[in-house]
Image (cartoon, coloured by chain):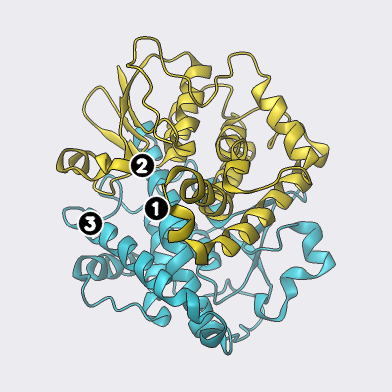
Chain colours: A cyan, B yellow
Amino acid sequence: MLKLHSMQSSGNCYKVRLLLARLGLPFELVDVDVLSGENRTPDFMMKNPEGRVPLLEMPGGRFLAESNAILFYLAEGTPFLPADRLARAEVLRWMFFEQHSHEPAIAAARFWLKLVRGGRDLRTHDIDRWMEEGHAALRVMERHLARRPFFVDGVLSIADIALYAHTHVAEEGDFDLAPFPTVRAWLDRVAGQAGHVDMAWRPVGSRQMVSVA
Amino acid sequence: MLKLHSMQSSGNCYKVRLLLARLGLPFELVDVDVLSGENRTPDFMMKNPEGRVPLLEMPGGRFLAESNAILFYLAEGTPFLPADRLARAEVLRWMFFEQHSHEPAIAAARFWLKLVRGGRDLRTHDIDRWMEEGHAALRVMERHLARRPFFVDGVLSIADIALYAHTHVAEEGDFDLAPFPTVRAWLDRVAGQAGHVDMAWRPVGSRQMVSVA
C-alpha cells in the first residue's frame, strides 16, 4: 500500500491527501510533525535527505518528494491530468506558478503567522514581502479565472488542487480574499465537487489527528 | 514554426534554448528585454498577462509560459524525459525543487547583483537570504549527485537542463562553487554533451545578440 508521510496542517501535504481521496486510493498516513522537528530525525532524513513533507513511499521502498511531483505521479492516466499534450503542459505551468510565485508567500505567511508559536515576531522583516508577492499571485489567479471555471480546459485538474490547498487557508496568513471574488467562487467550486475532503480528513483506520496549531 | 520570446541573459530562457538546440528543433527567437521593460508593453501583456519570459508561442497562436512547463512540453516523447512513470515524476521532483528552492535564490542573486545596474544597493537586505537559501540548494545537489552522473536514472534529462541553466552562472551572483566539487563535475558533464550550446547561442538566422549586461 502507498504510505504518505505528512503533516496534517501543511497545505502541501493536504494537496496529496485531497487527490488520494478523490482517486479513492487506499494509503497509510504517517504523521510527521515538522513543528517538533520529526522531519529532522536520522530515520526521516534517510527517507528524504531534504527533511521535507509530503513524502510518498512506494510499496517497493522507493520515495518521491515534492508535493506537485507526487500529484503528477498519482494523476497520470486519471481525469485529474489531461491526456492532451499542451493541456498537460498548461497544468504544469500553473503548478510551477504555484511553487514559484504563490506558495513561497502565501504558505510561508500562514506557517509563520499561524502555525509557529511566536513566528510573527521571528519573521517581522518578511511580512511585507509575503504580502506583496502573495497579492500579486492572487491577482494573477483572479484574472485567469475571470472567464474559466477551472485553471485548464474547463475541468478540475491537479493544477486546481495544487492552488486550492494554500489559497483556501490564505486568510490564516493575513491575506484578505474579499477583493478576489472570482478566486472565492472558484474555491467554492473546488470544495463543492463530489468526493472533496477538507484539510482535517484522514483515511479510515489512521490514528487520531494530532493538533499542531 | 515555434517562436520563443526570450531574454538572452536569462537562465530561465537559456534552459529552453538549450533544449531546443539539443532537440534540433527550428524556432524563431524574439528578444524581450526585461531590463528595459519590454515585457510590460501592452503587446507583450496580451501574450502573457504575467509579463514574464520565456514564453513559447505555438504556430496556432497559443502560448505557454513557465520555463519548466515549456521544457516538459518540448521533451515529451524524447530521450530528455523518461518513459517510466516514476522516473518522469522524479524529473519533475527536481524541476519543482529548482523553481521553489534554487532559482528564487540563485537566479535572483545573479539578476540583481550582475544584470541590474545598481541592483546590489537596491536589494541589500535580500542578499543574506539568497546566500543562505542558495547554498542550501547547492548542498542538496552536491549530496544527490555524489553517486549519480545525472539527476535521474543515470541519463541527462530536462531536470539537469533546468538546474544547469542557473547553476553554471551562479558565481555571477556571488556564489562560490569551490566547496561543491561534485556539482562542478556535473556542470562539466552537462556542458560536455554532444550538441550542448552555451548561453549566448542563438538559432541560425536570428538577429544579432544584444548585450544587456
Give above or below for A174 relative to B30. below
Q: Which circle marks residue A90 in the picture?
A: 2
Residue A20 lies, in percent from the top left, at 52, 60
Query: In terms of image quadrants, where is residue A44?
Result: bottom right
In the displayed orientation, state which residue is furthest to the bottom: A118
Quadrant occupied by the C terminus of chain B: top left
Give above or below for B106 relative to A174. above
* CA gap, disc 1 and disc 3: 12 Å
Foreground pick, B49 / A59 = B49
Give the number of marks: 3
Q: Residues within 10 Å of mark 2 (few under 14, many from 20)?
A: many
Foreground pick, A199 / A77 = A199
Q: Which residue is mark 3?
A: A145
Q: Callout 3, which amino acid?
A: Leu
Q: Which circle marks residue B36 in the picture?
A: none
Task: Answer with left or right where residue B132 lies relative to residue A163.
Answer: right
Q: Callout 1, which amino acid?
A: Ala
Work out whether mark 3 precedes mark 2 in sequence or the reverse, and give the earlier one: 2
Residues marked 1 and 2 touching at CB (< 8 Å): yes
Q: Are marks 1 and 3 on the same chain?
A: yes
Foreground pick, B75 / B172 = B172
Residue B163 lies, in percent from the top left, at 59, 39
- Residue shown at 38%/50% (left/top)? A94
Q: Which residue is mark 1?
A: A159
Q: Secondary structure at mark 2?
A: helix
Q: Residues within 10 Å of mark 3 (few under 14, many from 20)?
A: some
Task: Answer with left or right where residue B182 lies relative to residue A118.
Answer: right
Work out whether mark 1 precedes mark 2 in sequence or the reverse, and give the earlier one: 2
* CA gap, disc 1 and disc 2: 9 Å
* CA gap, disc 3 and disc 2: 14 Å
* Residue B40 appears in view: yes
Residue A85 lies, in percent from the top left, at 39, 32
